[in-house]
Image: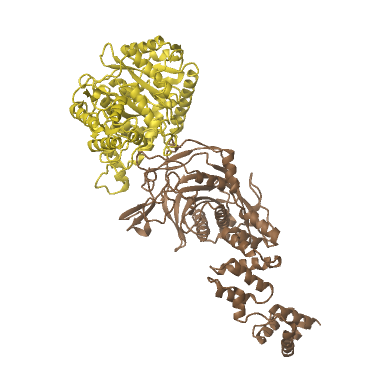
Amino acid sequence: MANIDQLSAARIAAGVAAGEFSATEVAKASLDAIEARDEKVQAFLQVSSDLALAAAAETDRLRAAGEKLGPLAGVPVAFKDNMHLVGTRTTCASKMLENYESTFTATCVQRMLDAGATPMGKANMDEFAFGSSTESSAFHRTNNPWDTERVPGGSSGGSAAAVAAGEVTISLGSDTGGSIRQPASLCGVVGMKPTYGAVSRYGVVAFGSSLDQVGPFGRSVEDVALAMNALTAAGRDPYDSTSQPCAVDFLEHLEDPVEGMRVGVVPALMEAAGLTTEVRAAVEGAAKALENAGAELVEVDLPNIKSAIAAYYVIAPCEAFSNLARFDGVRYGYQEEGCLSLAEQTSKSRAHGFGEEAKRRQMLGAYLLSSGVYDKYYYPAQQVRTLITQDYKRAYEQCDVILMPASPRTAFKFGEMSDPTQMYASDMFTISNNIAGNGGISVPLGLGAESHLPVSVQLQGPAFSDRKLLRFARAVEKSFSARGAVAPEFAGKGGELS
Amino acid sequence: MKKLAEVLKDWEAVIGLEVHTELTTLETKMFCNCKNTHDDPPNTNVCPVCLGMPGALPVPNRAAIQSIVMAGLATNCQIMRHSMFYRKHYFYPDMAKNFQTTQGPVAFCMHGHLDLEVSGEGAAERPAWEDVAGDGETPISREKDGSYVAPIRILRIHMEEDAAKMVHVGGEEGRITAATESLIDYNRCGTPLIELVTEPDLRTPEEARLFMEKLQQTFKTLGISDCSLENGSMRCDGNISLRRRGETRLGTKTEMKNINSFKSLHDALEYEICRQAEVLEEGGIIYQETRHWEPSRRRTVVMRVKETADDYRLFPDPDLAPFDLTDDFIEEAREKIPELPDAKRDRYMHDYGLKRADAAQLAGDPAVADFFEKALEGAPKKAVATIANVMVNLAPSFDALSPAQVRSISGLLAEDAITFAQAREVLEAVNGTEKDPERVVDERGMRQVTDTAALEPIVDEVLARCTDQVQQYHDGNKKVVGYLVGQCMKASKGSGNPKLFNKLLTARLEA
C-alpha cells in the first residue's frame, strides 16, 4: 500500500489504531528498510529486532484487547547509543563500553515506549558525543544519505541519518553544543534541542551535564511535536533534579499563523566568517518567507556570542572530564589485562579504552580544572555564560524567536576537517543556545544552490517557549512546502508496508 | 620522650579537628533512594546512582539537608541561604564515580562555635600562664579551682556523601599494601555525611576530647546520628602542630587518623605532641604527613607523606542546581531541635538544685537524660536529689535497670531504709528483671531499723565497751565517731541505720 518512509508518525499511529495495518507490519517494514538501506548508510550500531517485534506485538495485543493506544503507537524509533534501553548495549560508540549492557532504561526512552513507539535500535554517534561528524565513533562511520561520501554531521549522526534514509520515522539524539541541530541540517531533517530541563537526562550517558539536552529528529515538524508530547507529557522526572515541568500540547498551536509576531535577525551572524553563500541565501529566504507570512523582522544584537565557542570549550571539557572519570575499568567497561597495580589498570584501561577525541577533551578538562588554572579559565567562562544568557534575554524583549543558520555549511567529506578546532567551528551557530539553556530547532529548506545538499535554518527561542518555536518551524516548513524528504538514493528501497 | 606537662611548658600545641558524622538516622542515602543501613549483606543496598553507573543522576535528600541545618543551628553556625554542591575528584574504587559530591567554599553552615567547660585534671593540662591571650584572642579566665571555659570556633559544616567500605585481604593489618584482594562494599557509598571543621583553637588533648564529647552529645540529642566512634559513624581526624611559646606563626602540622575512641583521641594527640617536641628539640623537622594511631603500641606511625597538595579539581556539580534555603525551611529545622545538653544541664541545676557536674553528666547523653526524667515521674520533690545521686553514682554500673526501679531504690535510700552498699546489692538483684527493689529489700529482710528505742541499747553497749575511743573523742578527735558507728553496725548485724547510729552517738557524746 505504501512505503514506510512516506508515512508520518501521526499517520502510522492512526493506521495502527484503526487496524489499517498492524504495529508488527510497521515494525517489519522498518526492519526491511534498515536491511535494504543501512548497509550503505550505517546509521545503526545495533538493530534491536527482537525488542521491536515484541513491542509491536504488545501494541497489537493492546489494540485487540480494546485498550487505548498511545500517540506513537507502532511508530518505529531509533535511539542514540548514549541512551539506556534494557535489552540493548549502550556503547556511546566507544571501545570503553563496547559490551556494556543497559542496566536500566532512560526516562526519555521509556516515555517514547510508553507512548507506543517501537524501538528499532541504537544509532551511531561520535564517541561519547564528542564531535560534529560521527567520525569519532570507535566502530564505523555513518554516511550521509544525501551523499554517502560525506558525513551526516554529529554527534547524533546516526539518529539523523536513520530518519533521512527513511529507515525509521523518529529518532532521539542529544545536543550539547549542536549535536541534534547540526546533523539535522546536514541530513535535511527536522531536529530539535528543547529548553534545558524540558526533557529528562536520566539514563543518558552524560557529556556536559549543564549543556546536554535530549531531543527528537523527524521528517516533519509535526512528527517532532508529537515526539515532544511523548517526552514531556508525564511531567518532570523526579530522577533528574534539573528537569522541569513543561507539559503542554505541542500540537495545539502548531498551525496557528505567525502574523504580527516578531522574528529577530542578528546581522553580525549573517556576515560570520565560514558561512557559505548558499546557506546564507537559504536562511535569508526563510526570513523572507516568515515576513511574507506576516511576521515582522527585527534586528537584534547578541554581542557576546562571539565568545561562545571559547566559553563552551572550557565548560564542556571540564564537565566531560568529570563525567567520564567513572570509566576506570574496575567494575565494567574496557579493562586492561595483566596489570600489576590499580593505578596501572586505571591508566591503561583509560588510555586504550578511549579514542583520541575523548582523550583530548578529558585532558583539556583535567588541565582546566587543575589548581591555578581553574581561576583563569573556568570562572571567566562562567562569566561569559552569564553575559550570553543576558544577551538573549535582552534580545527576546524585542522578538519572539531568533533566526540564524544551524550549520555554516552543508555536509563535508570524510577526513576533510582534520584540525579539531576547525571541527569545533561547525557549532558556531548552535553552541550559544546550549550555553544559555534555550531551545532551538533546525528546519530543512531543501537543497543548496551550489552543493545540491540539504540546507536549513535554525530558530531559537527563550527558555520554555518550545511550543512557539515549533509553530514558527511549522510556518517555515509550510512556506517552503518542503517537508523533510527521504534522501532519493534510499527512498522506497525496502520498507514496503503490505 | 618528655611528658606532656613538661612539653607544654615550652611549646604551644595547636590542634584542629575534622569530624565526619554519618547521618545514620535517615532512611535513605544522600542522592538516591537506597536504604541507609550498612548491616545488610554487602552490595545489597545499591542502585545505579550510588554505584555511579553511566547515565545515573543524583537527587538530593531533603531530610539530610534539614539535619545539617539542625547541626549548624545547634553549634551556633550561620546558615548559608545560598550554597552549592561541588565535585571532588580522585581515582579510587571506593567512590564509584571517581568523584565525591561535597560542598565548595560556601557550606550550608559556616562560622559557628561551641564553648567547652574544662575542669579538674583536664584543666591542669593547659599551663596557667597560657591564659594570657595573643593578638586578637579572647583571654581565658579561670575559676578558683582552675576550671575554665574555652570557646572553640567552628569553621564550617558541609554536606557530602560517604565512600564505599573497602576490605583489603592478605596484607598487613588490613591495609592495601601487599593485599592480595581488595573487596568493596558499596552499601556505605552515598551515605549522607556531614563534615565539621574546627578552627585551630584547641590547645590540649583534653580540650580535643571534650570537644568531641560535646559534639557527640549535641548530635545525639538532635537525633541525626547514632554517633558511634567505635563503628565509625562518627570519625575524627586531628591536625596538630607545635610552636614555641610566644611564636605566632603556625608550625608544620601532621594529621592523625584511625581515632576510634575518646581515649584514642586524647592519647594520640598526647603522643604526637611529645613526639613532635622531641623531633623539634633535636633540631629535626616535622613533615606534613598523615599518621596512623596504633592503640596497641600507643604510638603514631606514618601512613603517607604529602609532598604536594592533592589537586581534587573541585568545581560546581552541574547535575545539582544551587541550593536556596528559605526562611521557612530553616525555621522548620529550628523547631525540630530538642533541648540541647547545656540548656538541659542549666535546667537541672535550677529546677532540681543539682551540682553542675552531676547535672552535666545527666544532661549530656540524651538517653541518660530521658531515663532520669522518667525516673522522676511521680517521685516526691525531696527524692529528686537522691534519684540524681543514684543516676550519677550507682546506675552507670548497671545496664538494664528501669526508671521505676531507680525511683523505687531512691525512695528507700531517701527514707534511710537501706544503705548505699545495700542499694548496690539490691540493684544487682533486680538488674535485667521486672522486680521491684522494695520487694527484694523486704524479702531479704534488709530494711534497716529506724526505731530509736531499738537502737539505743546497742549504743549503750558500744559506748561502755569502747572507753578508749570515747576518751579520744573528748580529747578532740571527732572523727573517731566513725569507728563507733562501725561497731554499732557490727553489733546490730547491719540492720541498724548508720545515720541514726551516728546521730545517737553524737548526742550521747556531746551530752
- Looking at the image, residue B278 lies above or below residue B51: below
Residue A77 picture quarter: top left
Q: How many marks?
A: 0
Q: What colour scheme does the image use? A: by chain
Residue A81 picture quarter: top left
Left or right: A72 as drawn, with respect to B87: left
Q: Kindly indicate which chain is depicted in yellow in the rendered structure.
A: A
Left or right: B430 as drawn, with respect to A370: right
Left or right: B79 as drawn, with respect to A310: right
Q: Quadrant of the N terminus of chain A?
A: top left
Would residue A337 be seen by someone viewing this image from the given angle?
A: yes
Q: Quadrant of the C terminus of chain A?
A: top left
Name the residue rendered at 57%, 38% in the picture: B326
- Looking at the image, residue A171 lies above or below residue B469: above
Q: Residue B204 at what x, y percent from top left?
A: 57, 55
Q: Residue B148 at what x, y percent from top left?
A: 65, 56
Front residue of A11/A450: it is: A11
- Residue at the right extreme? B511
Residue A85 picture quarter: top left
Q: Residue B29 at what x, y percent from top left?
A: 44, 47
Q: Kindly indicate which chain is depicted in brown in the rendered structure.
A: B
Front residue of A357/A413: it is: A413
Would residue A155 be seen by someone viewing this image from the given angle?
A: no
- Looking at the image, residue B452 lies above or below residue A38: below
- Looking at the image, residue B369 lies above or below residue B505: above
Front residue of B283/A165: it is: A165
Q: Residue B260 at what x, y percent from top left?
A: 48, 58
